[in-house]
Image: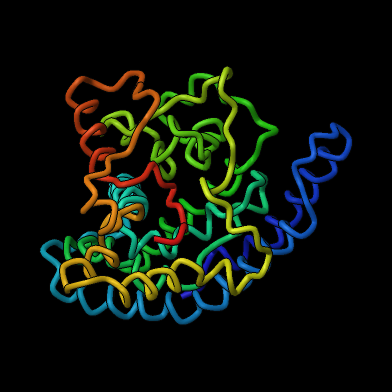
Amino acid sequence: MHDLIHYAAPGFLLLMAVEAIVDTVMRRDLYEIKDTLASLTMGVGNLLTNLLAKAIQFSVFTLLHRFAMFHIGYQWWAWALVFFADDFTYYWYHRISHESRFFWASHVVHHSSQRYNLSTALRQTWTGNFVSFLFWVWMPIAGFPPAMIMTIGAVSLLYQFWIHTELVRGIGLFELFLNSPSHHRVHHASNPKYIDRNHGGTLIVWDRFFGTYEAEDPAEPPRFGLTKKIDTYNPVRIAFHEWADIWRDVGRAPGWRNKILYIFGNPGWSHEARDAGQKPSIAKIDHGTSTTKHDFAAVARVNACIDLRRYENEPR
């Protein structure tokens, strides 16, 4: 089947050019040529690897759909249902991509830029699409047609393109339920209070419900990128640096339990820090509208880490 993202690529480039022109007029210094070229290269690589990844995904979904519990067609209500099902699944995929190093190794690519502009939206993984679709395998089993699942997924990604900008400050009351540039700036920030917040795709309601929402604070502007910068524009290094670090850590880890945790555990976990009894320090835990129950859940997640991470690719 055809991928909507491929058709949207010229529009992406046009909107980037408009943003760059506005940036030049406003002198905001949002773009840097080497960073932008790195992001575009990652985007091209993502499109090329997706040719194979999407073929695998569609084949798996088609196979699983033969065993569907229900036979959902293409009625209007089915499109509404698949929208919410996809967005809910995306939230958990995205959240786990920040909490498990195996998935973070692919997703870290998207967070590696210290700029936040429309080109950052195109800085995508070359490896993640071969495994990320596993979060969606329940949907063809439930009865959603494979073409419907992949179409709504592409629509979600199209929506998420425009929120990678500093030029739009807010979208009013729509911010109560829609993901926005403001919400997503928080997600891309490396400030301690912003780390691992706002995982939503199109909707922000899942973050509000599950306690991962954080509003952008005018008194604390987001600092974009990783807590420890990778300091490279080399696309191969950007794409594979965390996989290389995992390989290194697994090779030197004592025992199979530690090796497995270096692959699937928290991105900031290390056996040395665990053995030394180290815990992360955090200046403030403030989750805004989250309930007390969600506050405790957030504290538990933080205490499970060994570093405040975003996901420091530091020697362990």
Asked which quadrant contains residue 54, the reply is bottom left
Q: Is residue 257 left or right of residue 251?
A: left
User: Horizontal and vertical percent for residue 258?
Assistant: 21, 66
Q: Nearer the viewer, residue 199 or 228?
A: 228
User: Horizontal and vertical percent for residue 168?
Assistant: 65, 31
Relative to 282, say whether 256 is above or below: below
Q: Nearer the viewer, residue 125 or 221?
A: 221
Q: Quadrant of the C terminus?
A: bottom left
Relative to 249, say whether 222 is above or below: above
User: Horizontal and vertical percent for residue 4?
Assistant: 54, 64
Q: Is residue 118 left or right of residue 254?
A: right
Q: Nearer the viewer, residue 270 or 221?
A: 270
Observer able to see residue 76: no
Q: How is the image coloured?
A: rainbow
In the image as oriented, which residue stretches furthest toward the front? 276
In the image as oriented, which residue stretches furthest toward the left? 69
Observer able to see residue 255: yes
Q: What residue lies at 87% left-to-right and 40% top-to-bottom?
A: 24
Asked which quadrant contains residue 251, the reply is bottom left
In the image as oriented, which residue stretches furthest toward the right? 25
User: Horizontal and vertical percent for residue 231?
Assistant: 64, 58
Q: What residue lies at 52% left-to-right and 21% top-to-bottom?
A: 217
Q: Nearer the viewer, residue 235 or 78?
A: 235
Question: How many numbered marks does the figure carry?
Answer: 0
Q: Is residue 245 left or right of residue 164?
A: left
Q: Is residue 251 left or right of residue 184?
A: left
Q: What residue lies at 28% left-to-right and 57% top-to-bottom?
A: 272
Q: What residue lies at 62% left-to-right and 65% top-to-bottom?
A: 7
